[in-house]
Amino acid sequence: MKDVFIHESAWVDKGAVIGQGTRIWHFCHIFSGAKIGEDCNLGQNVMVGPEVVVGKGCKIQNNVSIYKGVTLEDHVFCGPSMVFTNIYNPRAHIRKMDQVRPTLVKKGATLGANCTILCGVTIGRYALVGAGAVVVRDVLNHALAVGNPASRIGWVCECGERLGDNLRCDDCGKKFAEAENGLVSA
């Protein structure tokens, strides 16, 4: 693992794959079979479970656990203490790992601090899930989703700024149009 920083308190199991330029900070645990892309940053106390895929350029803040069944595409931001689930109806006395529901977070999405992502959903490209939101269904591309349960209250640009009714970003000038799966570049 060339040009990878792993803090001395972190634990990386044999069989984990970590991309060049990635930084893994204090008290992290990366399980065997996890795949982490290039130039990622994993903050303190991050757990990446078996068979998890993390794309390149992802930023995973402190106290995030990414369980089996979760896939993060490139440049995903996971805010501090946000939560993924992987079993819809877990029980301590019944092993249900054969019931993992896959969760996909698409390129460029942001998951705010302390939000919860119910297993089996897809978070669209460049979507922004607000802090504390509880996501129980798919989030469209470029959607701004907040609340419990999370619902779309607007749209956001690739640069993260909220879009006005004209679907043009005042910050970077990019224009969008509505489509079935959210917004697309116009």
Image: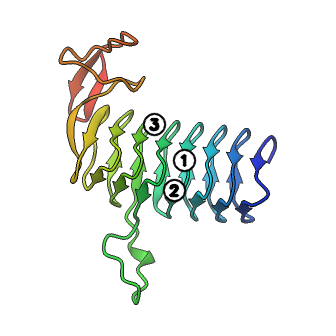
Q: Position of residue 12 (x, y in %)?
A: 72, 61
State the residue position of label 1. 61
Q: Are marks 2 and 3 in contact (CB under 8 Å)?
A: no
State the residue position of label 2. 64
* SS of the residue under disc 2: loop
Quarter of the image for the C terminus: give it. Answer: top left
Between tags 1 and 3, which lies in front?
A: 1
Q: Are marks 1 and 2 in contact (CB under 8 Å)?
A: yes
Q: CA distance from mark 1 to mark 3?
A: 17 Å
Q: Which quadrant holds residue 96? A: bottom left
Q: CA distance from mark 2 to mark 3?
A: 18 Å
State the residue position of label 3. 107
Q: Residue at x 32, y 11 (%)?
A: 170
Q: Position of residue 35 (x, y in %)?
A: 62, 53
Q: How many marks?
A: 3
Q: Residue at x 18, y 18 (%)?
A: 165
Q: Which quadrant holds residue 93? A: bottom left
Q: Are marks 1 and 3 in contact (CB under 8 Å)?
A: no
What residue type is disc 1 on? Gln
